[in-house]
Amino acid sequence: MTLIKRASVFILTVFVLTLIAGSPAQAQKAPEFSNDLMMDNKTYVYLIAEKLEYRSISGVNPLMWELQGYVGKDLNKFWFKSHGEALTTESEAEMEFQGLYSRAITPYFDLQAGIRYDLAYEGGGNKSRGLAVLGLQGMAPYFFHVDSGMFVSEDGDISASLEAEYDLLFTQRLIGQPVIETSVALQDVPEWGVGSGFNDIGLGFRLRYELAREFAPYIGMNWERKLGETADMARAAGGHVSNLSLLGGIRMWF
């Protein structure tokens, strides 16, 4: 009887294992190893025109842009950023370009470092400068998009900027976007119209409609005010200290 019991147990075990091996859930062959399964291997390319807009400011009516994009993997990327404005009524413009190495330090934030180049022209003259950049970009709690940076110019002048925005979904396609911007400097830089302390503050709201996820016309309004010594420099040069403008533009990404 002992031999028969052992044989029965063996046959039953073989039968159960055969059923398990034949189950569709268990019989799938494991995929062969591939680097595509590993993090930080796939290369991504992204470009967005966050702002391409016209603003109605009496006497100047500038065209504004804010572009940025990257190429790279999950952890390491190269970022390109540019923003600026060109006046439609005068031969005057200011623009900024940044090239940055970006490293993901949390699931939501990247630490960035690189260089920035500023270029401005007015009438027949122009000026430029180079700066080192250390920045932090990502998504703060409650889904606020944050882009901040600290800058050191070739002359040793130190400044910083912060921009935060938030998407309010009224529908799946109609989206409101409040924006706040500010900047600060440690030294006076008169040739660039910058005073020490807080330089300015900007508040804006844009209402866009996504005809496609990649293409959205928008309208909105924007208020800006120069502060402290920067405002004093603007007054002395006969410029605007504060302005409120209506705007219209297009947001698109690739």
Image (cartoon, rainbow, N blue to C red):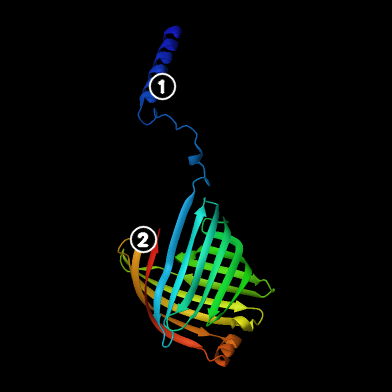
In front here: 55 or 211?
55
Could you say which quadrant of the image residue 88 lies in? Answer: bottom left
Residue at 52% of width from left, 67% of height from top?
A: 147
Quadrant (top left, top right, bottom left, bottom right) of the N terminus:
top left
The residue under label 1 is 17
Q: Are marks 2 and 1 in contact (CB under 8 Å)?
A: no
Residue annotated with mark 2: 214
Say above or below: 197 vs 128: below
Picture residue at 49% right of the left edge, 48% below the top? 43
Amino acid carrying mark 1 in the image: Leu
Q: Residue at x 38, y 78 (%)?
A: 247
Q: Position of residue 103 (x, y in %)?
A: 58, 56
Q: CA distance from mark 2 to mark 1?
A: 53 Å
Residue at screen point 53% across, 59% down? 79
- Residue 39 is situated, as x and y percent measured from the top left of the image, at 52, 45
Residue 4 is labelled as none
| Label 2 neighbour load within 10 Å: few <14, some 14-19, many 20+ | few
Between circles 2 and 1, the one closer to the viewer is 2
Vertical order, 63 against 105 (above or below): below
**For residue 110, side relative to residue 246 (left or right):** right
Helix, strand or loop for disc 1? helix
Residue 24, image x, y percentages:
35, 29
* Snapshot quadrant of residue 215: bottom left
Please indicate whether residue 251 sits to the left or right of residue 79 in the image. left
Query: Position of 126 compared to 50: left or right?
Result: right
Neighbor class of circle 1 (other Cα within 10 Å; few <14, some 14-19, many 20+) is few
Which image quarter holds the C terminus?
bottom left
Instruction: Single out the residue that lies furthest toward the right.
Output: 156
The earlier-in-sequence mark between 2 and 1 is: 1
Q: Position of residue 159 (x, y in %)?
A: 62, 75
Q: Secondary structure at mark 2?
A: loop
Q: Which amino acid is tagged 2?
A: Glu
